[in-house]
Image (cartoon, rainbow, N blue to C red):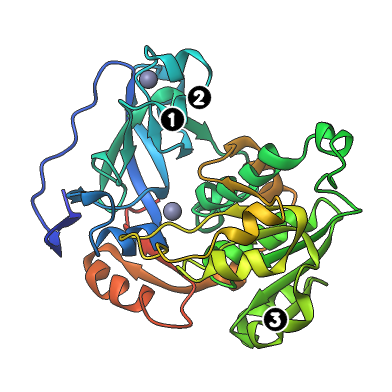
Amino acid sequence: MRALVYKERLRLVENYPMPQRKEGEALVKVLKAGICSTDLEITHGYMSFGGVLGHEFVGVVEDASDKKLTGKCVVGEINCPCRRCEYCKRGLPNHCPNRTVLGIAGRDGAFADYLTLPTENLHPLPEGIDHTKAVFVEPLAAAFRILEQVQQPLLEEAGKAALGPKAEVAVLGDGRLGLLVAQVLLLTGCRLAAIGKHPEKLGILSKRGIKTALLEELKNYEKKFDYVVDCTGSPSGLETAIRLTKPAGTIVLKSTFSHNKAGSVDLTPVVVNEINLIGSRCGPFPKAIEALKRGEIQVEPLISGIYKLDQAVEAFGFAAKKGVLKVLLDMDSGY
Ligand SMILES: [Zn+2]
Ligand SMILES: [Zn+2]
């Protein structure tokens, strides 16, 4: 099969071995896949991963232990936990130290004709979500993860604004993830501002009624927000987020880097202002699927280009360019 392989360099391999489905897994024919910042970071050394890249996909199950899944159009959760360790038993499978992660750690990914995943990772798509939109389920689920982490009534008892209508919330960064996160936070009814560098990208959000601001106006926003979500993908994002956050406020960090470039951030204001720092990664697929189905999240304006798998290396070059949002790969599989 064809596969986009990263091993020291990125190349398309025409005769890559087919993945072998283990017991409890499904063999999925990939239809479309999305290139995300994590993929670009891996090509700069993030996770020291070598293999087939890609973790945002939609596909059709060709063969599975669970025969009901055969022929179904699916999206898939990317963490494959051991189900035996302490973290798995505590209900934190995404933190299983023995896990493999599709296209990121120990498991070949989705930029190929086929992939395998445990059947329990798969979510059949309901009617009304086309393949192109479905590619956004994985990153959209990561955006919904924020609500799982902060929207608890207990926060109000502790004197902190729950992430709801009373909260002042900023999304920092107008890239691929920031534009999804802002749309998810809008659903909470919070007082939302999206802050970024690119008027044309922020325009996608202002069309949806979201207040936007340019990074250069930052001075007007210092200590104005109960919640700041850093989606900048930049080492300077945390420092900016600290400046924007009210005392006793919360920063949610979504950016990951290939190197520890954030090493020199002054964390004293975090201590003095008792700011909560929350790291945030993968999230609930059913929430993301439902929101797409209801039309609550607009993903079409986020698509900058669709390339064939055979042009995957060029697609990566394009995805890394400034101003480019989501780039999709189409496996041209005849579906
Ligand atoms: Zn991703
Ligand atoms: Zn485990």
3 vs 2, front mark: 3
Residue drawn 71% across and 71% down? 194
The residue singled out by tag 1 in the image is 95
First in residue order: circle 3 vs circle 2:
2
The residue where tag 3 is placed is: 218
- Looking at this view, name the residue that lies furthest to the left: 15
How far apart are the two marked residues, 1 and 2, measured between alpha carbons?
A: 6 Å
Label drawn at residue 253: none
Q: Distance between the residues labelled 1 and 3?
A: 35 Å
Q: Examine the image and state in which quarter residue 160 appears.
A: top right
Label 2: few (<14), some (14–19) or many (≥20) C-alpha neighbours in 10 Å: few
Residue 326: x, y in percent?
Answer: 47, 68
Q: Position of residue 265 (x, y in %)?
A: 49, 65
Q: Which residue lies furthest to the right in this view?
A: 166
* Three-letter code, disc 1: His
> Disc 2 designates what residue?
92
Looking at the rendered structure, the kind of residue marked 2 is Leu
